[in-house]
Image (spheres, grey):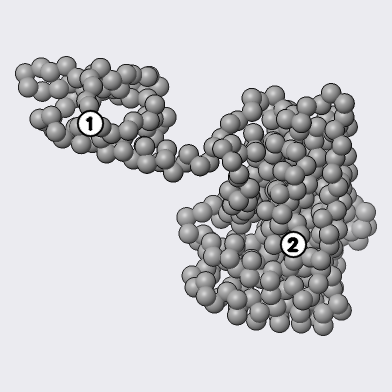
Amino acid sequence: MVATPERLEQTPTELSPGVAPSSRVAVLLMGYGEVESYEDFANYNEQALNLLTAKFAPVPTWIYPPLAKLLAVFDLHEWQHQHDHFISPHNAIFEQQRAGIEARLKEKWGDRIKVFKAFNFCAPFLPEQVLAQIQAEGFDKLLIYPLLVVDSIFTSGIAVEQVNKALAKTFVGSEHWLKGTRYIPSFYNEPEYIDLMARLVEDKIHADLAVAHLPSQTGIVLMNHGCPHKAKGFTSGIDESQALYERVREKLIHRYPLISVGWLNHQTPLIEWTQPNAELAARNLIDLGATALVFMPIGFATENHETLLDVDHIIHGLRRRHPEVTCVQMPCVNDHPDFLQMAADWADGQIADLLEAEALAVNPSLAIALAQSYADHYHHEHSQGHSHGHSHGHSHRHSHGHSHGHSHSHDSGHAHPPEHRYAHGHTHNHSHQPSHGEHSHRH
C-alpha cells in the first residue's frame, strides 16, 4: 500500500468570462490511496503508522521505519505471490469517482468549481501537494470532502489533520490565501446511501441466488471497516459504523432474517478490535442455516485491497470447510451512477454556501499574539478577583446568552483582547456594587 508513481493529472481550469477569481471553489475529494508500485510499500506503511496506528497503538515512533519495512515484506508476499502480482484498482476507481462527481457539479456550477483528488499516503497526490496546486490555480475557497463512509479519527479525522498542516505551510505574507472553507465529514447516515446499499443487495440476491435459495436461508454479511475499541479519546468510528449497519439491516430484515455485521479488522497484537469479524459472522450465519452468503461492503465507498484480498481469503476458507454453501462477493459502490449523483448532491449545498459567503480575512501570524493576549486577560481577571478584598461568599447570577460590559475599570497594564469570550461563547462583564463590605457579581 503506498505512494504511486502517477503524475498530477489535474489540469488547470480556465475561467468563464465574467466569473470573478474570488468566486471559485476547489472541492478536495480525499481517500487513502493504495500502492501501485511494490517498491513503495515501506514508504506507505510508515506514513500509515504515523497517521493511523499512532492514534490507537502504544508503539514508540522510533520503531515505525523498521516496522514499515517488515510489513512491506508481508505485503509483497501477499500481493505478488499469494495473489498473482495483484495491483489495487483503488486509485483508478477513485479517479473515476472524482471525474464523475465533477461532471455532475459542473452541470450547475460550471468553471466556478473544480474537483481535485488527494490521497492520504500516496505522492504526488498528498494533501500538501494538491493544496499547493489549488492555490497556484487561483482558488480561494475550499470544500474538504473525504469520500469515506464513516466519520472517525481514522478517516475524516486524518484528512482534516493533513489539510491543516498543509495550510499552515502555504501561508505567506499578512493574509492567508484561503478565504472560506466547508467540510463534509461522512455520509453513513444519508438516507440515499442506505437505500442504495439495501437495493444492491436485494438486486444481487434476486439475480443470482433466489432461484436456488429460500430467503430465510440466504445469509447477508454487511461489512464495515474494523475499528479498535480504544483510540486515545478520539472518535473511533464504532458507533457510526454500527448505526450504518443497523439502518441497512432494517431495510432487509423482514425479507432476509439471516443478517450480521462483519468487521474487516487489522489483527494488531494487544489491540481489541470490533467483533464479529467478517469470517466469524459468516460461520455464525451458516450455523443458523444459511445455504448462501452475500458479502456486501457497506462501510467502503471505493474498492481496495481489504474488500478484495481480505474478503477473497475469507471466502476461500469458507468454501474449503463448507463446499455446499454458495458465497457471493459484492463490489463496493465505486462509480455507480446513483452514488456519484448523490455524492455530488451532498456537495452542492456546501458549494452554494461558500460562493455566497463573505470572504474571510485571516492572518495566522497573529495567532500567537492573540493566544498571549487571552492568557494575559485571563491572568488579569483572576488576579483582580483576589486583590480587592473580595470575600468567597459572592453571589453569582449567570444569565447565559446575554452580553454585559465592565462597569469597573482597573488599570493593570495588561493587554486585553477587544472582546473576551468564555467557554460558552458569552461575553461577560462585571458590575461591582459594594454592599456592607461584600460585592454582588451579576453576570
Under mark 2, the amino acid is Ala
Residue 49, image quadrant: bottom right
Under mark 1, the amino acid is Ser
Q: Which labelled disc corresponds to residue 123?
A: 2
* Residue at 6% from the left image edge and 18% from the top image edge: 436
Q: Nearer the viewer, residue 148 or 423?
A: 423
Image-based side of 46 in relation to 320, left or right? left
Give the quadrant of the N terminus. bottom right
Residue 226 vs 323, above or below: the answer is: above
Image-based side of 157 in relation to 115, left or right? left
User: In this rendering, does residue 106 appear at all?
Assistant: yes
Residue 287, image quadrant: bottom right
* Residue at 88% from the left image edge and 39% from the top image edge: 103
Q: Nearer the viewer, residue 366 or 43?
A: 366
Comes first in the chain, label 1 or label 2: 2
Q: Nearer the viewer, residue 399 or 253?
A: 399
Dot 1 alpha-carbon crowd within 10 angstroms: few under 14, some 14 to 19, many 20 or more: few
Q: Residue furthest toward the left?
A: 436
Q: Point out the frontmost of discs 1 and 2.
A: 1
Residue 186 vs 234, above or below: the answer is: above
Residue 258, image quadrant: bottom right
User: In this rendering, does residue 312 appear at all?
Assistant: no
Q: CA distance from mark 1 to mark 2?
A: 53 Å
Residue 193 location, x and y as percent?
76, 43
Image-based side of 104 in relation to 314, left or right? right
Q: Secondary structure at mark 2?
A: loop
Dot 2 alpha-carbon crowd within 10 angstroms: few under 14, some 14 to 19, many 20 or more: many
Residue 421 location, x and y as percent?
39, 30
Reading the image, the residue beneath label 1 is: 412
Residue 152 location, x and y as percent?
60, 52
